[in-house]
Amino acid sequence: MTHHRSTRRDCLKLFSRAAAAGVAAPWILPAGALRAAEGDSENDRPVFGCIGCGAMAFRYPWPEITDLVNADKFGRVVAVCDVDRKRAEDASDGGKRAVYQDYRKLLDRQDIDAVTITTPDHWHAKIAIDALRAGKDVYLAKPATLTIDEGKQLWKVAREESKRIIGICTQQRSDERFLKAVAMCQLGRIGKIHRVTCAIGSGGAGGPFDKQNPPPTLDWDFWLGQAPKVDYRPQRCHGSFRRWYEYSGGTVTDWGAHHVDIAQWAIGMDRSGPTSVEVVAADLPVPFENGYPTVDDCFNTPTAFQVKCLFENGVEMIIRHDTDNGILFEGEKGRFFVNRGKLVGTPTEWLKEDPIPEEVITKLNGGKPLFEAPNPWTSHMANFVACLKDRSTPVSDVYTNHRGLSTCHLANIAIRLGREKITWDPKTEQIVGDDEANAFLSRPQREGYEISV
């Protein structure tokens, strides 16, 4: 018997044929193709540099889902960077990878094709923009931006650097359960949709925290970047930075970047946005004045919230902290629920008799078959690397990600300012009739760390 071993190039040719024909390949690519892609020759694998060596880059309890590990499955990671040099050294594979503390030096390397960016949120947009301008393709962690204006800036540079590929790590777009959910909505399986509920979990209170000297391996000023200069407290940094508005948007942009993205995609609003955002309830862990926390030694992002967003197609989206984490779709013909562990509800049972056509999933996945992989993180990286080869748009593109994340940013603006309701114009991307709220579309950036486009 003759055995033919598929190469990574064979797999990518299959991707290309699927993209050209729409249905020329199965919508789930077999695991053997994944193994072939991992085992390709060194010279044919994209060369990666990894910027940020924290939890989701390298240290997560399940390393198989991290960006560095998955980049090394499909490419060659030759350099790592972190403002905490110890983290970069830990990710250097015993010194086999070059170590940097300043990402700009990594971007100067001509041998690097693409970078993963897995830093704290307030650094995402600036590093991505610098990387695109340095001629690198970009795999960017979510949430991609700290503000709505950063999303506009990133989209502008992505258009200008049109030869570059940028994908966002919202890996639920590479999860079969969520793709089926989007397909069910777009195919009208539950009729006209009237409500979508995104349950994204609660935040956490904490503090007051004591000032300390930063670790000798950490460049604290560089870590702060555009954010205000403050004393070092460990709880502001590794592991819990997302509980501070200075560096993130809390759970609203953390999990919201996943579920709101899927929800807007499913209801056909991933290139638009809400027309209004209403705060039904919200709890902040510290007092706020004019949108800013009045203390600097406690977590300050929302601990609980319920926000109602209305879209121009009449769909109401609820973003809330309680109930089972996931997305509930409700329509004229029924409702169903999806999260990372299940796709349930009476309409999903109809899939046994009337399955989603292969070509629908393939189209949702950018014309490429979905990789059968141990987890969606690996499938998502596979999609990105395939796009590096045929220079196509990843399934998580920068523009629709900006639109979904803008909804999350708007929710945070309303919560911070104590607004019952704000009105949004999705065409002009401006808050209507509220100058104070419009000012929060951007944030002051510390001198030396500004984003300039």
Image (cartoon, grey):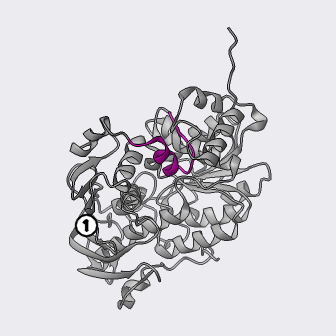
Q: How many marks?
A: 1
- Is 130 on the left or on the right of 213, as rendered? right
Q: Is residue 90 visible?
A: yes
Question: Looking at the image, which is closer to me, 285 or 313?
Answer: 313
Q: Quadrant of residue 13?
A: top right
Q: Residue furthest top?
A: 1
With respect to residue 183, does 157 lie above or below? below
Residue found 30% across the figure and 47% down from its top: 338
> Would residue 119 be counted in the magenta stretch?
no
State which quarter of the image contains the N terminus.
top right
- Is 429 on the left or on the right of 453, as rendered? left
Q: Quadrant of residue 124?
A: bottom right
Residue found 39% across the figure and 43% down from its top: 356
Q: Quadrant of residue 259?
A: bottom left
Amino acid type, residue under disc 1 in the picture: Pro
> Would residue 366 be counted in the magenta stretch?
yes
Percent position (x, y) of residue 7? 70, 29
Question: Looking at the image, which is closer to me, 263 or 334?
Answer: 334
Q: Is residue 294 visible?
A: no
Percent position (x, y) of residue 257? 41, 59
Give the residue at mark 1: 285
> How would you rate the neighbour count of disc 1 (Cα within 10 Å): few for under 14, some for 14-19, many for 20 or more?
some
Element at label 1: loop
> Which span is picked out in magenta?
356-372
Percent position (x, y) of residue 402? 49, 67
With respect to residue 80, does 249 lie above or below? below
